[in-house]
Image (spheres, rainbow, N blue to C red):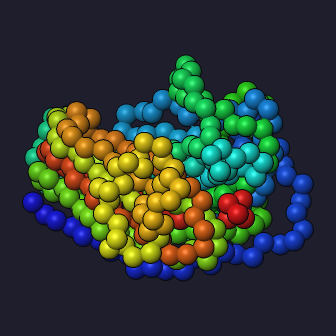
Amino acid sequence: MRRTVLVALALTMAAVPVAEAKPKPKAVAGFTMVYGWANSAVDVTVPKGAKLFVPTPEPGRTAGFAELVNYSAGQKDTWMVVALISRSTRVAGRPVAAVQVHAPRPDHCPSDDAPTVEPPPPCRTFVEHVSVHGVSATEVAGGVQYALPAGTYQLIVSGPSRQLLAAYFQVDGLGGQRGFVTNKGVGAAFDRNRSEDLVLAHSEGYFGRKLSASGMAVIGVWHAAAADEPGEMTYAQCVTAGDPALANPDDCTPVAASGQAPPAGVDAKKPVFAAFDGGVTLDPAGTETFQTPILKKGTYFNTFRVTRGGRGPAAGTFAWWVIADSLK
């Protein structure tokens, strides 16, 4: 068994100043294309009855509500994010939000030296992690619809700095097509790790980030194996303020049910968000994605542990950190 430990040192994400002049938000309609430099944003209006559509995934990939393209570096090898964060509607003390994280290659691919199986399962080159908060989901023919409350949203496209990105997404039930350039800056960063082994992939450690203003984190875990057979799958993640040594990801279990901050009176050094699962999975690959509550200015750590057994397994975690004025 190979054991991998990854530690990311705390870094500062400086929010980009936002211009005072605020143009009237454009209406989201039909198939919408948003493009601009990575980690920029624009305000848009979402009308009553609007729904994001996520199609049923094709073999070898998982779908999202947007198609993300990096014109500077290519789609397969870079991480990208598109987020819609409401300025007008909050649920449980934080904005309604829909976030899609595009995972880069080689994540979601099993171990290269795994025993050959016939036919070999496809490497999930394109994998979209979707997380929503305060948005209802309905299964429909061909996929899932997410109903967005009407109002003004901050639409963010995020990726490696100085990269030109585009997001194509569908708002179901509306006609027309519109493209526009993003015109505001946001602070964003991405951490990820991957572990693989012939029989048992294991990794643990933490990512650290210093937020210079209010923000949030979108965290996730993924696993893949080289055969459709059962295997051990356990993971735990914590987002905490302060010393990461105080955060054991397995202590986050009580918080996982609600996905919210701990009850009033709990020590502030305890987890502010967590996710936990365990046991044996019959699925050859899978993902889980979660949003934290709003994080105030300060230093935070995403502590993680992930293990995947089976034939040629691989597993990993990620965290997308964002500072935006819609999260104040």
Residue 319 quadrant: bottom left
Q: Is residue 13 above or below residue 307?
A: below
The picture places residue 264, in percent across and down from the top left corner, at 53, 56
Q: Is 44 on the left-hand or right-hand side of 3?
A: right
Above or below — where is 66 with respect to 243?
Answer: above
**Image quarter (top left, top right, bottom left or bottom right) of the N terminus:** bottom left
Relative to 109, residue 248 above or below: below
Residue shown at 32% from the left, 57% from the top? 251
Percent across and percent down for residue 17 are 75, 76
Q: How many marks?
A: 0
In the displayed orientation, state which residue is furthest to the top. 141
The residue lying at 39 percent from left, 60 percent from top is 238
The front one of 15 and 269 is 269
Q: Residue 215, position in %: x, y? A: 61, 65
**Residue 289 appearing in the image:** yes
Left or right, 148 with reference to 54: right
Furthest residue toward front: 265
Instruction: Say which of 130 and 159 sits in front.
Output: 130
Q: Residue at x 48, y 66 (%)?
A: 268
Q: Position of residue 122 (x, y in %)?
A: 29, 41
Please identify the quadrant where the C terminus is shown. Answer: bottom right
Q: Residue at x 88, y 63 (%)?
A: 22
89 left or right, relative to 248: right
Q: Is residue 125 visible?
A: no
